Image: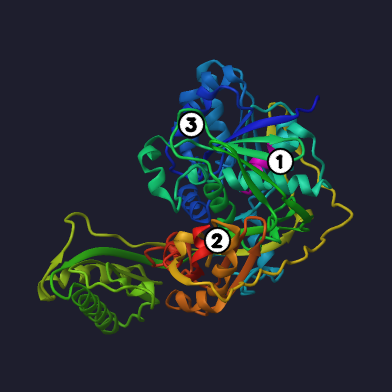
Amino acid sequence: MSMKSSIKIGGATGFWGETDLAMAQFLSEGDLDYIVFDYLAEITMSILARARSNDETLGYATDFVTAMVQPNLQAIADSGVKLISNAGGVNPQACAQAITKCIDEAGLNLKVAVIVGDDLLPRVTELSAGGAREMFSHEAMPAPDKIASANAYIGAFPVAEALLNGADIVITGRCVDSAVTLGACIHAFGWTPDELDRLAAGSLVGHLIECGPQVTGGNYTDWEAVAESLVEVGYPIAKVSMDGEAVITKPANTGGTVSRGTVGEQLLYEIDDPMHYALPDVICDFSCVELQQIGQDQVQVSGAKGRGVPTDYKVSMTWADGWRAGTILWYLGRKAAEKARFFAEEVRKRAEQKLTARGISGFDDVTVEIVGDESHWGEVAQYTRSREVAVKIACRHQDKRAVALLLREVSGAALGAPPGLAFFAGTRAKPSPVIRLFSIKVPKTSVALSLIDDRGTSKLPQIPEPSTLFTPAEPTDIPSVGLQADDTLTTVPLERLAWGRSGDKGDKANIGIMARNEAYLPWIAQVLTSDYVATRFAHFMTSPSINRYYLPGLPGLNFVLHNALGGGGVASLRNDPQAKSFAQILLDTPIAIPENILES
């Protein structure tokens, strides 16, 4: 097979339920080699596991079939573009069968391949007996009968093998988000397991486009600059060269923008240590990645390094831990926030008294959040008393009846509450299962992957390990501020000096900050210490622990906040269980900086 010198990859989705704008854009563009789809957040896995438990033909991202593939089958066949998707979720064979049925009904000749073996649910008893421990907290495994799903995060080489066998559409289970892109690069360029820098570069490209328009203006700090065009936001296209360098762009005549800011924000999104970002195929070092604006809506990305290869797969399990529910009401008028808190406390006390009377234990957790009361912004907030707030009341309990009882008291207490209560009339909220995440590591050699395509079922070989398993990066010191005698300091919000984006990994939050100008970084870093960020978010964190990392290439900082999300995902009772707002809170931080640096 002759190797291409470059390829074009479109990133069509970042989660299950995303709009279907991308396919029309990419097929109109007409010259893409691959379109990749990422559907599988941890929350999504728990939802899919529940769907499969109710119907054995489900458990995959149905939107991929009905919205992305089926309506576009003829155009996909005519263009020759290859589709790669982890839409298989916890039931990739059912997803592949649904697509094959659509192809047959359309009378087309497209080959579908499915990669299986990541599902370790049949082995949970064995893993529990073997003493498996949670990879972050080191807790013991939940009881096997409570585990709903258990999937290894597999890498890119099986995807490349499926493409080599002639697949037009590749379906995986819990393939890592970025690996669907890396698999295309491995196939197109013939990259081998020991070309670590190239594997890291391909992984970076996958990381940048895996969340669709988040790299083309969506969730952008400077959203006002692109607001008028976001209705038709363009989905990302990566032009990747054989050496791994890439240009991020978007289809012609689409909205949004591609800039150093949009790409930098996405680079920082939901990573941990940027010098040790572990993926199945390579341990990446993104700390010295550089971004260069080379044209309108074109940003060149270079500088990723590969430091080694993990010997284990990460395995994420979802397990049932009781029930939860929440509901939102509004309070208006004088002392709206105070009235809302009083009402929530009244509801909680009534519910707990009834639980006691029935011999039922108290709630595992009750969370009350007042939206419109700005006290959660911390000491820097200029507090303004609001005359209209929303109050969210949520609880968690092992007994479904207890959760239902609190919901009844929310509405039942309305006539004996402070004045100004309002709510949207309709169906009362219902209890839903609490699904928690539990992650372990298992040796790669213990996970057998197989490829199912028109040739039948074949076992995929184990990927050989490179001679060097890990070479640590040398950390770079953050430059110190240089204050001259005649400098005049001025104080501005961090947002004037930096872009920011935040996200989650289980119960951990990350906040990435990228300086708009290299000269700003020392002044930003002087204020944004780990201690400062810990203080700013102390009310969110059960046991404050923060890591700060420096990325000299951008330049930027990444903060990882541990135990910050109330359990994270669907286990959390928070308004923001995925830390999407954390960067917005931090960008309000006042930063003192010399006027001459700011003006330059």
Q: Which residues are magenta?
A: 176-184
Q: Is residue 300 in view from this perspective?
A: yes
- Percent of width and height locating residue 173: 61, 45
Earlier in the chain: of badge 3 and badge 1, it is 3
* Mark 3 surroundings: few (<14), some (14-19) or many (≥20) residues within 10 A: many
Q: Amino acid at mark 1?
A: Glu
Q: Is residue 23 left or right of residue 183?
A: left
Earlier in the chain: of badge 2 and badge 3, it is 3
Question: Which residue is at 69% across, 63% downward?
Answer: 441
Earlier in the chain: of badge 1 and badge 2, it is 1
* Whether residue 247 is situated above or below residue 572 in the rendered picture: above
- Percent of width and height locating residue 178: 63, 46
Residue named by callout 2: 512
Question: Which residue is at 77% across, 39% downward?
Answer: 243
Q: Amino acid at mark 2?
A: Gly
* Mark 1 surroundings: few (<14), some (14-19) or many (≥20) residues within 10 A: many
Q: CA distance from mark 1 to mark 2?
A: 23 Å
Residue 245: which numbered mark, if any?
Answer: 1
Q: Nearer the viewer, residue 198 or 586?
A: 586
Q: CA distance from mark 2 to mark 3?
A: 32 Å
Secondary structure at numbered mark 2:
strand
Residue named by callout 3: 68
Q: Is residue 165 left or right of residue 10?
A: right
- Percent of width and height locating residue 180: 64, 41
Outermost residue on the front side: it is 486
Q: Nearer the viewer, residue 500 or 139?
A: 500
Q: Amino acid at mark 3?
A: Met
